[in-house]
Image: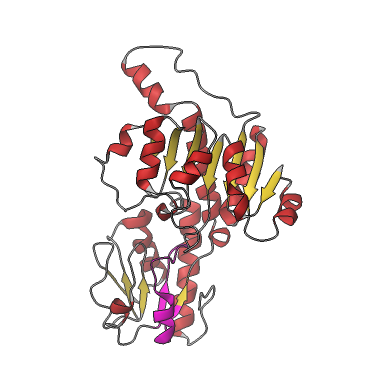
Amino acid sequence: MKILFAAHEDSWGGFLSMIRSELPEHQFEATGRFGVDSLEGFDVLIPTMCSVTREVLETCDRLKLIQQCGSGLEGVDIPAARDRNIHVANVPTDLSGNAGSVAELGIYMLIGLSRDMRGMAKSLANRKMGEPQGRALNGKTVGLVGLGGIGQALISRLKPFGVRLMAIKRNHPEKAMKAHGLEWVGAPGDLPELLGRSDYVMLCLPVTSETRCLMNRETFSYMKPGAFLINLARGGLVDRDALEDALASGKIAGAGLDVFWEEPPDPDDPIFSYNVLATPHIGGSTDVSMRGIVKAVAENIRRIESNLKPLHLKI
């Protein structure tokens, strides 16, 4: 089969070379960018960060599967794929080890912002020792917005730090509070309360029509003064201009960003002049998670080849 990888050859930690080694009998081709001009002649599309519109899908002549190499499918027009009888599948974060890897990056950002990594670099450059003074995590409150695979992975990793844990969950919040041993869990409508009580707000939920620009000027106004925002999920959850205003005004003390309003972001964007700890969308890019993702993607490609129903379908 012929498989199109909508990214550069070396994107996502060498995923393409790994899947090629796993499936040497198939032909893989990379677009060289996060985009697709035509799907003609391809059996499988691995979209990565590519937008898969109805117009793009009209160019396919034999496409059977859109298989994401992760969990995010917000860029795929799923109804248009359904109309053409094309399967759409992802790799759930808790299946591949991706959730644990993203959670570990979240801990890195939590500690980095708390101990002021940017200030440390300045102190070393200016030969100043013993500063800046950091913030200890013990006794602080962390608010998790979303309790899927990443949110649950964060819970187990955060508890040993002695933090108070709050969360927002779409369904059955009281049940989730008991199941995970959290101090408080609210429904989406309770977000202002979580924002007002949290020293750190960690976003770990998908982008939908309801959650796009969840963090905007209004919701930033609810945040506890001096708190930090960490986005581990999707850039579309945060209104970029509202974030810059919150940073510039000192409403929040800083932000940790692994995802952005546009990817790749402009390195000269003035938002990076503030206290922003940024990483290039590498939360799930570890040896453990990549092996798990490759295994899951290869399984679905083999299933398509054998005329079997793929796993983890979205349609």
The vertical placement of 136 against 42, above or below, is above
Q: Is residue 308 left or right of residue 238?
A: right
Residue 72: say if magenta.
yes
Residue at figure coordinates x 36%, y 39% from the top left: 244
Q: Is residue 188 left or right of residue 12?
A: right
Q: Total of numbered circles in the picture?
A: 0
Q: Would you say residue 43 is visible in this rendering?
A: yes
Q: Would you say residue 275 is visible in this rendering?
A: no
Quadrant (top left, top right, bottom left, bottom right) of the N terminus: bottom left
Q: Position of residue 148 (x, y in %)?
A: 59, 57
Q: Position of residue 173 (x, y in %)?
A: 69, 55
Q: Nearer the viewer, residue 9 or 213?
A: 213
Which of the colour schemes (rainbow, by chain, secondary structure, one colour) is used?
A: secondary structure
- For the record, the magenta segment spans 64-87
Q: Is residue 122 left or right of residue 180?
A: left
Residue 106: say if magenta.
no
Residue at figure coordinates x 45%, y 63% from the top left: 72
Q: Position of residue 304 (x, y in %)?
A: 45, 82
Q: Position of residue 257 (x, y in %)?
A: 41, 43
Residue at figure coordinates x 54%, y 56% from the top left: 97
Q: Nearer the viewer, residue 238 or 293?
A: 238
